[in-house]
Image (cartoon, grey):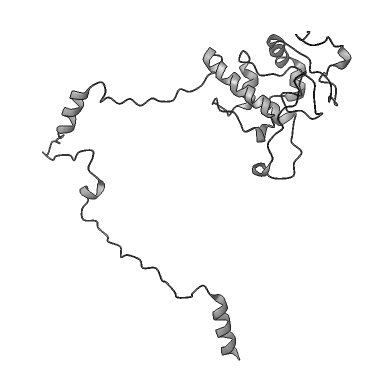
């Protein structure tokens, strides 16, 4: 498949999956249909099994903890489509992988289970360019209905639709069977329980007692021992 606006290249210049060193080589271009067929093939299963892509095929070579890791690289492939590194991120390194809203199965590898929130790229190892592409394609997938997601519950202010009924409801007091009136909603707990069962004394913090100056106690004990 030829790229528009670029000089035609040979197959020897393409970075296929069986090659280890890919710096300076072009990443092959595939369609979404070919990507879906690849993810359902035996070749994909032999490499990734049923585990996440970022957990199987890639790992950052860092000795520090996760929270002290530096940010991921800006991009793995330059504007001409060539690899600028040999150890690319999990999406850039595979010739069939690229984020597209028509294939949500690939995006779900980098989303938190059951949500539409992406996993931190410090954990997945995605470059910043692919992280931005993931966020854009997730938004596009939600708009086109290819990716399921939860809709946040919307709280309505019913005073805007029923102002008169709401005013009457605030003025009324609900009564129980024993003719005991219930307090309104704006009554605090202190007004309901005016006499608590236990009253705790106020604690006065000690000041200028030098209880934590251990070196003064040490001198005192030393003199006493002599």
Camera-nearest residue between 87 and 7:
7
**Residue at 79% from the left image edge and 15% from the top image edge:** 28
Q: Position of residue 86 (x, y in %)?
A: 82, 28
Give the residue at the far front of this rendering: 5
**Residue at x-position 66% and y-position 19%:** 99
Q: Residue furthest left?
A: 179
Residue 3 falls in image quadrant: top right
Position of 219 with respect to 127 (left or right) is left
Instruction: Give left or right: position of 31 versus 202.
Output: right
Q: Is residue 175 left or right of residue 162?
A: left
Q: Indicate the quadrant containing the C terminus: top left, top right, bottom left or bottom right.
A: bottom right
From the top left corner, tell me how far across and down residue 37 is, in percent: 71, 11
Q: Position of residue 43 (x, y in %)?
A: 77, 18
Q: How many marks?
A: 0
Residue 176 as seen in the image, left or right of residue 133: left
Position in image of residue 196 (x %, y %): 24, 56
Which quarter of the picture shows residue 93?
top right
Q: Which residue corresponds to the image point at 33% horizontal and 25% vertical from the top-left?
A: 156
Q: Work out which quarter of the rendered image holds the N terminus and state it.
A: top right
Residue extending furthest toward the right: 12
Tell which of 79 and 140 is nearer to you. 79
Quadrant of residue 104 within the rendered picture: top right
Question: In the picture shown, does residue 3 fall above or below 155?
Answer: above
């Amino acid at each position: 498949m030829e790229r528009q606006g670029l000089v035609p290249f040979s197959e020897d210049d393409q970075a296929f999956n069986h090659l280890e060193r890919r710096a300076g080589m072009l990443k092959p271009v595939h369609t979404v249909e070919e990507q879906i067929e690849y993810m359902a093939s035996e070749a994909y299963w032999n490499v990734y099994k049923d585990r996440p892509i970022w957990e199987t095929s890639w790992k950052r070579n860092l000795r520090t903890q996760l929270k002290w890791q530096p940010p991921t690289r800006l991009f793995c492939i330059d504007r001409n489509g060539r690899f600028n590194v040999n150890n690319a991120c999990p999406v850039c390194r595979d010739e069939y992988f690229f984020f597209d809203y028509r294939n949500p199965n690939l995006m779900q590898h980098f989303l938190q289970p059951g949500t539409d929130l992406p996993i931190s790229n410090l954990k997945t190892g995605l470059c910043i360019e692919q992280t931005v592409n993931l966020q854009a394609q997730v938004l596009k997938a939600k708009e086109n209905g290819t990716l399921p997601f939860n809709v946040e519950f919307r709280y309505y202010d019913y005073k805007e639709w029923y102002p008169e009924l709401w005013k009457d409801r605030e003025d009324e007091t609900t009564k129980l069977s024993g003719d005991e009136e219930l307090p309104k909603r704006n009554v605090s707990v202190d007004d309901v329980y005016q006499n608590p069962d236990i009253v705790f004394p106020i604690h006065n913090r000690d000041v200028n007692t030098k209880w934590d100056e251990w070196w003064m106690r040490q001198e005192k004990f030393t003199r006493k021992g002599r």
